[in-house]
Image (cartoon, helix red, strand yellow):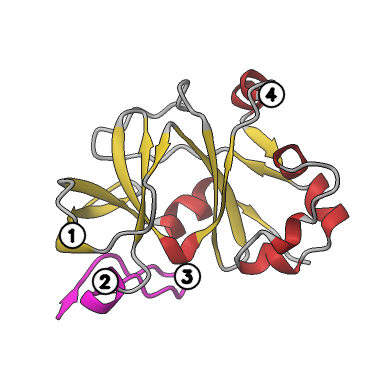
Amino acid sequence: MRCDAINHDYGLDMNLTEADMEGNGYHELVVNGKALAVPAARVAIIRDLPSRRRRGIIRESRVRLGELFSFFTDPSALFKGPLAGVKGGLLRSLHLPVMVPAGDGIVEYIDELASLVVVIYDGWWNGVILCSEVGPAPVPLSSYTKAPSGDITGSAEWVDGRGRCLVLDTGKLLRREGFLVVV
């Protein structure tokens, strides 16, 4: 059974199937008090937001990836997706924009209570979402309802009974606010 989400002109097939919703699952991100579902396959890394740099990151609306790791850590070994292939020195100096999802009643400003950095990707497009909470592990979704609004494709139920959440269209968000990284 197919749940038609959004077909983009730029060649991505965002049609969700039950296998997609049950496969890798979705991470729950709480952004400005709203629960968003982000496909686990699109999450490159989740890290704590450095408290000493939090105010500056929110003001500048960008994150230098080197701030998320200790000096002796090879960051490329910790990433998933295309950033995993970038050499450590270049990855440390890379700045990614802080993106704010839009649509369906989401307050469109950076979450001031954010304590976590979530780097997401779609192909070579990359960006950062600051959030106050992330669910402990990816969870499948069920009963998807199509209702496109801004960066939201619709809503769905968490299989584990947490209630409804908004399903984020990462491709649309990244193409609007993200950064194209080609190495």
Q: Are marks 2 and 4 in contact (CB under 8 Å)?
A: no
For the residues labelled 4 and 1, the Cα–Cα distance comes to 36 Å
- Residue at coordinates 69% horizontally, 62% vertically from top-left? 83
- Residue 129 x %, y %: 50, 41
Per the image, the residue denoted by label 1 is 159
Per the image, the residue denoted by label 4 is 53
Side (left or right) of 82 relative to 111: right
Q: Earlier in the sequence, mark 2 or mark 3?
A: 3
- Helix, strand or loop under label 2: helix
Q: Are marks 3 and 1 in contact (CB under 8 Å)?
A: no
At label 2, which amino acid type do we have?
A: Glu
Residues in magenta? 1-22
Q: Earlier in the sequence, mark 2 or mark 4?
A: 2
At label 3, which amino acid type do we have?
A: Tyr
Q: Nearer the viewer, residue 57 or 69?
A: 69
Side (left or right) of 147 relative to 112: left
> Is residue 10 magenta-colored?
yes
Per the image, the residue denoted by label 3 is 10
- Residue at coordinates 35% horizontally, 48% vertically from top-left? 151
For the residues labelled 4 and 3, the Cα–Cα distance comes to 36 Å
Quarter assignment of residue 59: top right
